[in-house]
Amino acid sequence: MEKILEVNDLHVTFTTYGGTVKAVRGVNFHLNKGETLAIVGESGCGKSVTSNAIMRLIPDPPGKISNGSIIFNGKDLTKLTEKEMRQIRGVDISMIFQDPMTALNPTLTIGSQLIEGLRQHHKISSENAKKKALEMMDLVGIPNPEVRLKQYPHQFSGGMRQRIVIAIALICEPELLIADEPTTALDVTIQAQILELFEKIQERTGVSIILITHDLGVVAKIADRIAVMYAGKIIEVGTKREIFYEPEHPYTQGLLKSVPRLDLKGEKLTPIDGTPPDLFSPPTGCPFTARCPFAMEVCDKVYPFHSELSDTHHVECWLQDERAKQLLATSATK
Amino acid sequence: MARYILKRLLMMIITIWIIVTLTFVLMKAVPGSPFNEERTTNETVQANLEAHYNLDEPYIVQYLLYLKSIVTFDFGPSIKQPTETVNDLLGRGFPISFELGIVTIIVAVISGIILGILAALRHNGIIDYVAMSFAVLGISIPNFVLATLLIQKLAVDWGLFPPATWSSPAHMVLPVIALATGPMAIIARLTRSTMLEVLTQDYIKMARAKGLSPWKIVFKHALKNALMPVVTIMGTLLAGILTGTFVIEKIFAIPGMGRYFVESINQRDYPVIMGTTVFYSAFLIFMLFLVDIAYGILDPRIKIHKKGGGE
């Protein structure tokens, strides 16, 4: 399969008065054409920073991509000038934001916000732009688009606004769509509609999607592959099936145990004890050690190596080491 | 919309009526009259004069006569300069005051907004610090102090601009600088702080994600939102500039309306007091009305309802 995006050893830091926050610490992943990759993890694990880094939207200063490469269609985005990057934003890579209530400018009409990206990047008459806008409104399922184009954001409900935001992101027909928690601010029924919209759009346009979320329900519905992030690192990546049915990293297992399920009535949810490490001075070893029920002496000292369980299923955990496996096997027989 | 404007007009008339009544009461409460100066006039002459200007009538009749003069906008002749009517004075003074005021507002708004934007875009940079130190100075130095300093330095010492009077564009420079610096500083500070806030909004990030140029982001997406608070304080600034003109006109010997306004009170020149007060208040109220309309145009969320009511 053709890779559309490859992120290698990405480091992002933020310099503050209190010190340097290492928000993303060596992230590696890739995205195939036409697939949906979900990046999951708890708040502050660096998933939004990763997505902003791909768009080069990290405010600099204080933020900085301090190392690594982001290869998109053969070009390293970290090497581009701001001007070159502007030719890619909105055209080749688009982004959808978390809160539709604040993502639209309250003083401009929906129509002008829809069209401006198109007119920025393509020479297109205002009539054709309007035609395209109407098409997009239709695609995202907004009834009565002629009238709606002339209205302002405050005249739309939250779900409708998110549809508009999606329409804006898609109007230049991007190859890659980054959705940063696109359903978090919406209520459950609207969430389902928006997710269906994503599926429909991917089917029609073949766009590749990176979905940033902490909602495993959303992931289960639309992701092809899942990357689990913790403390600025991707600790496990695999297909949806591999992550949901054969999670190897104790953190992934913990995440799955803490999700409420309708089919397991009466069973208690198990939270993961403790809090994530301080990213001002992240631990040298595995960052999950302090919270891990299987923590060993080595975990705290050395970061685990990368193990490939299959072509798609990779994990970074000391439990994958042969010696740890033997230990577990002997303690199980005892 | 038409109904809203009609309602506002009615409110304006009521406001002006209240101002007129208060002015009348204050005017009569202040001791003295136009005719008792040090030079004593003959009592019969005084009585005749008072009768001529209807000052011997009971207050209520005088009050009604004033109201009539306001409704017909005919204030009659000035008592002190009987050869001229109040309308003559206003007609001569107002265009000059208006010119000074308008140029001041334009200068203050444009330079204030530009300074504010520059300071916000170069947040915590040298431009920011320079602009904001400048703004603090502008707010703290009263315009009459600035005016005298400007005359001393730019006019007397360096001879760059004429020190006083009003005849050519060069004459405008000093009074406009003196009058505009304060409002400009306030606008610059306000624009900077709202701009900084707006620039962190999601819709600005969204605009960047669309690949728009920084120029477009600032002027199309940020400025309109950042200007809302500026428009809000425009009303107060207008009032400030208007009253500021009294002092500035005096210092620069500009033959505007402010001079008549102040002199008429000292001289108890009742028709002129009444005329200038009504004119000033009507003008200010009308400008505030325009500011409210501008607000509705800038922010579509503020609807001017058919049923009336501000928001």
Image (cartoon, coloured by chain):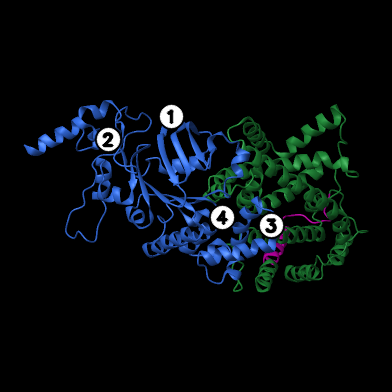
Whether residue B311 is visible here, answered yes or no, is no
Say which of A264 and A32 sits in front: A32
Marked residue chain, label 1: A
Q: Please state which amino acid type lies under the numbered disc 1.
A: Thr
Q: Which residue is mark 1?
A: A20
Q: Are marks 4 and 1 on the same chain?
A: yes
Q: Which numbered disc, 1 or 3, marks the residue that appears first in the sequence?
A: 1
Which stretch appears magenta?
Answer: B15-37
Say which of B230 and B259 sits in front: B230
Q: Which residue is mark 3?
A: A124
Q: Position of residue A234 (x, y in %)?
A: 36, 39
Q: Which numbered disc, 4 or 3, marks the residue that appears first in the sequence?
A: 3
Real-space CA distance between mark 4 and mark 3, rounded to the nearest whole angstrom: 14 Å
CB under 8 Å between discs 1 and 3: no
Q: Position of residue B250 (x, y in %)?
A: 81, 43
Q: Please state which amino acid type lies under the numbered disc 4.
A: Glu
CB under 8 Å between discs 4 and 1: no
Chain letter tied to blue: A
Q: Are marks 4 and 3 on the same chain?
A: yes
Real-space CA distance between mark 1 and mark 2, rounded to the nearest whole angstrom: 26 Å
Q: Which numbered disc, 4 or 1, marks the residue that appears first in the sequence?
A: 1
Q: Which residue is mark 2?
A: A317
What residue sits 63% from the left and 37% below the top?
Answer: B119
Q: Is residue A19 above or below residue B182?
A: above
Q: Position of residue B276 (x, y in %)?
A: 79, 58
